Image: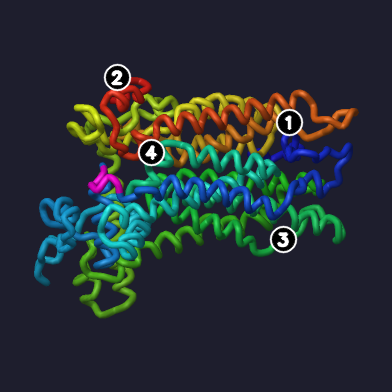
Amino acid sequence: MAVTDSPYQAYESSEVGVSQPQTRSVRDRVIPPMRGSVLWGWIGPLLITVFGGILRFINLGHPNAVVFDETYYMKDAYSLITWGVERVTIKDADKAIIAGNTNIWQSCTSETLDKCASYVVHPPLGKWMIGVGEWLFGLNPFGWRFAAAVIGTLSILILARVARRMTRSTLLGCFAGLLLALDGLHYVLSRTALLDIFLMFWVLAAFACLVVDRDRARERLVAWYENSPMSPHGPSLGIRWWRIGAGVCLAGAMAVKWSGLFFAVAFAIMSLLWDFGARRAVGLRNPYVGAFSKDVPQGVVAFVAVPFVAYMATWTGWFATATGYGRNWDQATSAGNPFFFVFDSMRSWIQYQWQVFTFHSDLATSHPYMSEPWQWPLLLRPVAFYYEGRQNTCGVKDCSEAVLGVGTPVIWFGAVAALVALITWYFSTRDWRAGAVVVAYAMGWLPWFYFAIADNRTMFLFYAIPMVPFMVLAITLCAGLLIGPSTPTAAGTMPVRRTIGAAVVGAFALLALINFWWLHPILSAELIPYTEWKARMLFEKRWI
């Protein structure tokens, strides 16, 4: 996230057989060319995505039970697609649903509608997305997990493509997609109807849009530099649809969970700093004046106006119906004046949001699987989403079915080292990629320290899922450094350093695959002997 623009070094052209030119034009320096085949740039990531999707969709409806906080979100989702808002359900609704009964709503009269309105503490978009699967496949485990599996699978493709764009290497893009496909926490959340996988998706999609926007803006700037008379400030870059798309995605993140706001603020600042660096990179005399006059106004639209409109659109069901919590429909419609309706509806909505804010601020209920944010990178306290002990059903007396929300240790521990390396790399070279990944990771992690210290809030490891794509990107960038540039030696062969680097990176990918395979039975509720389940508890006293 540097204002100055450092040259693309080391693994920028890490495709096999691509040599580095001795001198580079302004175009190559500001927009390094994409190496390798465009076709394979899609085929490779798509193959990795298919692999990850198969893993996530196999036996998706198992376990045939309500897993952890699915009890909240799958019912809220079904209520949204049925009523447009969340409603209160009957007692033991989970048992009724598993038995195939969807008549789960508490009955109300027109005079007691307010008693049927459910008080919910997260915005509606994630539940609407879960509801799509329920609308397609019914109120059953496969139906309410379908959207999570789709979104988890798509995030593999997005990460592979954005890693390819950042490294200019299809090989490294596929490496990133493979690591995400093999991460245990990502896998579990892709098969569970919780909100956090949707938050991760929208954050990653916003980041990807901004990386594309960075390239597109620089292409326009270089085209102006090559074909137009120079000016101190540079040109206006026109409508930047990828930046607007990022604004929509950031609104999506906030409309799933409010913690998306941290990313929205950081990404907006980061994108504008990229604009300053681009104008300086082409040699403008007053790059910052040009950026403030031509880029910042568009940034305000993309990062303020667009997200506000998109965020409010996700609340359409609440505004359009009389049965939402805190709606005060009778009061809003009593004057028969559309302006009063809008004003009073907004007043009721703001009051509702304030109630939710105070709820989160006071959320300090103890939970056996809660953890602190400083424990997350080392996987010190994962979450048992599901556990069922069985007798004589797996060839031995004591058997277990478990879903443990935990990351793949090889990936998570490797990411700790990679992030330390990226911080060092950024401060020594000011490379924008290292800065961007570190900032994105920090926005998924550091704000929770405040809530842990100031509010003593109840938190869980799976809150860290928005960090996971950026952990993988950190590993990928370091992998590129290890492999190095594809510059042949005088004899026409690849340097020994590159051969060794490729072997190390390949070995890491193989270790991640083996580690995921070993954990898979306790990530997917496979029926195994109790002794095998216990053997997979890396830190027995903390994982059980």
Q: Given this view, does label 4 or label 3 mark the residue nearer the observer?
A: 4
Residue 544 sits in quarter: top left
- Residue at image mark 4: 463
Circle 4: is it few (<14), some (14-19), or many (20+) Cα within 10 Å?
A: many
Q: Residue 236 carries which label?
A: 3
Residue 63, image x, y percentages:
27, 45
Determine whether label 4 and label 3 are within 8 Å by CB.
no
Judged from the image, the secondary structure of the residue bearing numbered disc 4 is helix
Q: Earlier in the sequence, mark 1 or mark 2?
A: 1
Label 4 to label 1: alpha-carbon separation: 34 Å
Judged from the image, the secondary structure of the residue bearing numbered disc 3 is loop
Q: Which of marks 1 and 3 is nearer the N terminus?
A: 3
Where's the N terminus, which quadrant? top right
Q: Residue 421 carries which label?
A: none
- Residue at image mark 1: 484
Q: Given this view, does label 3 or label 2 mark the residue nearer the observer?
A: 2
Q: Which amino acid does label 2 sit on?
A: Lys
Q: Earlier in the sequence, mark 3 or mark 2?
A: 3
In the image, farthest residue toward the bottom: 336
Determine whether label 4 and label 1 are within 8 Å by CB.
no
Q: Earlier in the sequence, mark 4 or mark 3?
A: 3
Label 3 to label 2: alpha-carbon separation: 59 Å
In the image, farthest residue toward the front: 395
Residue interval drawn in magenta: 62-67
- Residue at image mark 2: 541
Label 1 to label 3: alpha-carbon separation: 37 Å
Residue 481 visible in image: yes
Label 4 to label 3: alpha-carbon separation: 40 Å
Q: Earlier in the sequence, mark 4 or mark 2?
A: 4
